[in-house]
Each structure stands twice: as structure tokens, then as C-alpha cells.
Image (cartoon, helix red, strand yellow):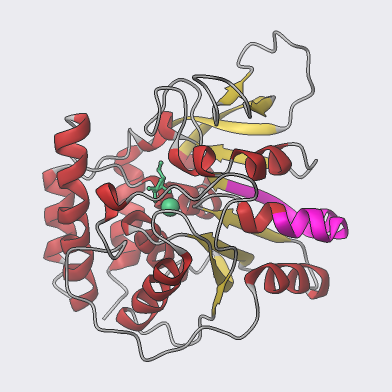
Amino acid sequence: MPLPVILDCDPGHDDAVAILLACASPELDVLGISTVAGNVPLEKTSKNALKICELAKLDHVRVYAGMSRPLVKELLTAEEVHGKSGLDGPDLPVPKRRLEPKHSVDFITEELLSHKEPITLIPTGPLTNIAMALVREPRIRNHIREIVLMGGAIAEGNTTPAAEFNIYVDPHAADIVFRSGVPVTMIGLDVTHQALVLPDRLQRIRDLGSHTALVVAGLIEFFQEHHRVKYGMAGPPLHDPCAVAAVVDRTLFQFKKMHVAIELEGRLTQGRTVCDLWNVTGNPVNSEVALSIDAPRFFDLLISRLAKYP
Ligand code: BDR
Ligand code: CA
């Protein structure tokens, strides 16, 4: 039986690829896509989710818009990474499809409470929608199988030296999620920086030859420029698809169980995921943190799933 999942995202180039990976994976039943403000404001992340669904002819996948700003902080966006639209690069038509009329926090809550089995949440943006749902309706905790999120890092930052973008944008939401008691799997930068789209991998995507694959290749080409100039990487990291892959096939990763806390105040460290790798605090485990990924197998999976699209 496919695992019921909800994608909560801020597309975003890598979010777009995460949507495509999830929706082409028979192991998953995607109940809907929820959007949040992050890489660009909410109106654009929502429009981008619709664009990707139209591109890939995912007519049955519904898109719900959620929180337009973080819980406490002002919204910080990442146009320098994703361009003005949030999905710069190939020209994607203005979507004809519309958003669902329901707020995504309502969608997530109602879906969790009514579904016959627990649902896995896969957030790949700031955790604002998930935190809001948990605070507003704590009963949903027992209906979440697991939260498998892209965010944080054991040992590095990409927005500040200490913090990763998704956690830095809404650390208060991340704090609520990590303290919620729901099992969390954290796919952080330590791992996603091992999942680089090297030139031969990009060529394999291009060689699929379909319209969707060529658009994905174009998106990756845009995304790679920032990572080349800013971080000197040989290819862009596919952060968000790693979180989806961890639900599709957990054996792609090595994990360690540990306690993760979110730094809310630090003068230099706000948004840091403080990972107690050696359990020096004695705090109980609240997360499984990915330590490494089998990148060749991850790209085999991704490319085989992209091959299904027209
Ligand atoms: C995360 O930040 C966003 O820019 C990406 O979409 C990804 O979710 C990586 O730090
Ligand atoms: Ca994202």
C-alpha cells in the first residue's frame, strides 16, 4: 500500500523537483501540496506549485496555499538563489489551474484527522504551516506517522555560518516541530551537499528528452549558477528531493538518532539546529538525523522517476 503523504513546500527549484519525484513514486500517495512563504512570497510559491503540476500533467494533485509569513520574524526570501519568480530559468506558462479555496493549515489538519491511517508530512520549506497546525489542533500529533523534513545541518549553514535557510526563516516554527513529540527525520545540508547534480547527472536528465525533463534540466541549470558562484560547488545540491527520497527508500541514507534543539536567540546562531551527536546533554532522542546519502543510487531513483513524465 502506498504511504499517504502531504508535501509542504516553497517552490523553489529543488522543491519543484521534489514534487515531481513524489508524484511519480508509486510508494507514495500524495494527498495534496501545501505551500508556504519562503524562497519567495506565498503568492509566488503557490503559483509555482501550480505551474509544476500543469507542466507534468498532475491534474489530480490539489494545491493549498498556507502561511504568508513566519510566526514571529519578518519573512526573509531567497531571490538570489531562485530568481525573482522563485522558479527562474525556463519559461513556464501562467497556470490555468487554481488553488483550492481551503487554507493549507485547515487542509493539513482535516486530512490528518479524517484519514484512515497516519500521514507522513514532508516539509521542504520553512515549518510555519506545520507548526501552526500543531499549535491550533494538538490532536493531530497522534495522526502524523512522521515528519521528514529538509532543513538544518549538524555542522554548517548556508544562510548564516550557523543556520540553514528553512530553519533560519522560521526558527520559532522549527522549535515547535522539534519539540512536538512527533518523530522527526531531519535531512540537512550535511547530506544534501552530497547530492550534487554533477554534469553527467544533468546530461542524463536532459537525455530523457521529454518536455518535463528538459524543463527540469533548465531549472537545474539556473539553480547551478548561484551555487557555483557563491559556494564553488561542482553542481547544485538537490536539497528537497532528498527528503522525498528518504520516504521512498530509507536505505539511501545513514541515520543517527539524537536530540535536536533549535537556537532561537543566539547573537550569531539564530536558527541553528543544535544536534547532540554524542548525547552530551542526556536529553531524549527526538530526531533521526541523516549523516550520509548514497548519491549515485539517489540519482538513479530520481532519474527513473522523472522518466515517467511526458
Ligand atoms: C533550502 O532552502 C531553499 O532555498 C531550498 O528550496 C531548500 O529547501 C536549502 O537550504
Ligand atoms: Ca524549499
Q: Main secondary structure of the magenta part?
A: helix
Q: Is residue 68 left or right of residue 259?
A: left
Examine the rendered structure and indicate whether residue 256 appears above or below residue 301. Answer: above
Q: Is residue 168 left or right of residue 278?
A: left
Residue drawn at x 63%, y 71% as measured from the top left: 104
**Residue at the far bottom in the pictured view:** 96
Q: Quadrant of residue 48?
A: bottom left
**Residue at the far front in the pictured view:** 74
Examine the rendered structure and indicate whether residue 119 appears above or below residue 158. Answer: below
Residue drawn at x 34%, y 77% as measured from the top left: 51
**Residue at the far right in the pictured view:** 139
Tell me residue 187's x, y (percent).
Answer: 50, 39
Q: Which residues are magenta?
A: 132-148
Tell me residue 146's x, y (percent).
Answer: 69, 50
Quarter of the figure with the C terminus: bottom left
Q: Nearer the viewer, residue 33 or 10?
A: 10
Examine the structure image and report whether residue 86 is included in the region drawn in magenta: no
Tell me residue 201's x, y (percent).
Answer: 18, 49
Residue drawn at x 59%, y 67% as measured from the top left: 66
Q: Could one spot residue 102 in this view of the protein? A: yes
Examine the rendered structure and indicate whether residue 271 appears above or below residue 306. Answer: above
Quarter of the figure with the N terminus: bottom right
Q: Nearer the viewer, residue 174 or 288?
A: 174
Q: Nearer the viewer, residue 13 or 248?
A: 13
**Residue at the far top in the pictured view:** 280
Q: Could one spot residue 234 in this view of the protein? A: no
Q: Is residue 116 left or right of residue 5?
A: right
Tell me residue 28's x, y (percent).
Answer: 55, 66
Residue drawn at x 82%, y 70% as measured from the top left: 113
Figure disc tally: 0
